[in-house]
Image (tube, rainbow, N blue to C red):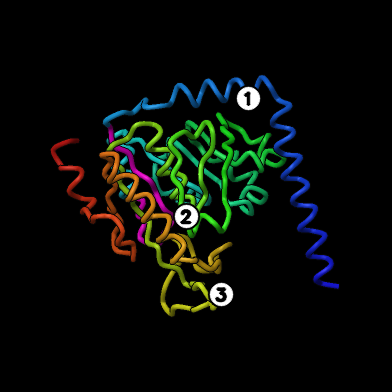
Amino acid sequence: MNYLVKKIKHTQLHIKYFVSEVMFFLSPVKRLKQRQTILSLKNKYCGKRCFIIGNGPSLKSEDLEILYLHNEISFAANYISKIFPQTNWRPTFYSVTDEGHQRRLIDVMSETGADFKIFRKKSYFWTRKVAGNCIWLNAIGNRKLLLHPLFSENILKNIYAIASVTYISIQIAVYLGFKNIYLIGVDNNYAKSINKDGIIREKRGVKSHFYSNDDIKENVCGAEWEMNIAYESAKSYADEHGICIYNATRGGNLEKFPRVDFDTLFPIYDL
């Protein structure tokens, strides 16, 4: 019986995904506006730097406040709003591309301040009423990408979803023309980690996010090996195209990108 219930829910969900894409297709004014917006963003920030914010436990509100004071362009995702009471900073680009989050975080997505909000077209059924300047991308995600990862050069056409929203943010940043991309709060380390064999390993004393261990989604399992595939793909593309991706995270386990001390990026005399 439980299997049958799950099967029915799974089928209903995929019907809604199909309906989402049909609804978006049948919104010509919104599609035209989105196309114009995406085209206007191409290489808009050529030669500049940006910061991609992860929700890892190393994330500090003080660092976000520095980004605010320096008017830095930044990307963030999902539950980042939980840190808003501690800082004036708000992301320039806010993404929610996890299919589960896109169904559950409607109020959070509307209340999160950002210049642009980015979702999957498959989520249009739920996210079409989110407040703000919204963009819906054709996100392609399947297990085959773990064997042959792809990196999008044209987000107007499609974007590839592998393991983490951070990978999507990197592809968007490259399309926008950023040549220096800094990651902070991307710890790549979870309280519960699932390996290739599906075995879950719990890590004592490890937090998954900057918010409380008792908070929602804290018990999610992170497939770090999948994320490493995504980060390796991003690094390979960046190296081949003269783009520098740095890890300015305070600690964590992400070693695919060269490390840089966040504090050295903002000399005190700049303020």
Count how many numbered circles sit on residues in the image. Answer: 3
Which circle marks residue 31 in the picture? 1
> Is residue 56 shown in magenta?
yes
Residue appearing at x 34%, y 45% in the figure = 237
Q: Nearer the viewer, residue 24 or 232?
A: 232
Residue 103: x and y in percent read 67, 49
- Relative vertical location of residue 171 with respect to residue 149 in this rendering, above or below: above
Residue appearing at x 56%, y 32% in the figure = 135
Q: Nearer the viewer, residue 139 or 240?
A: 240
Residue under numbered circle 3: 198
Secondary structure beneath disc 1? helix
Whichever of callouts 3 and 2 sits on the residue coming sooner in the sequence is: 2
Quick check: marks 1 and 2 in contact, CB under 8 Å? no
Specify whether 219 is left or right of 153: right
Residue type for callout 2: His
**Distance CA(mark 1)–CA(mark 2):** 30 Å
Secondary structure beneath disc 3? loop
> Is residue 216 shown in magenta?
no
Specify whether 129 is left or right of 77: right
Which circle marks residue 124 in the picture? none
**Distance CA(mark 3)–CA(mark 2):** 20 Å
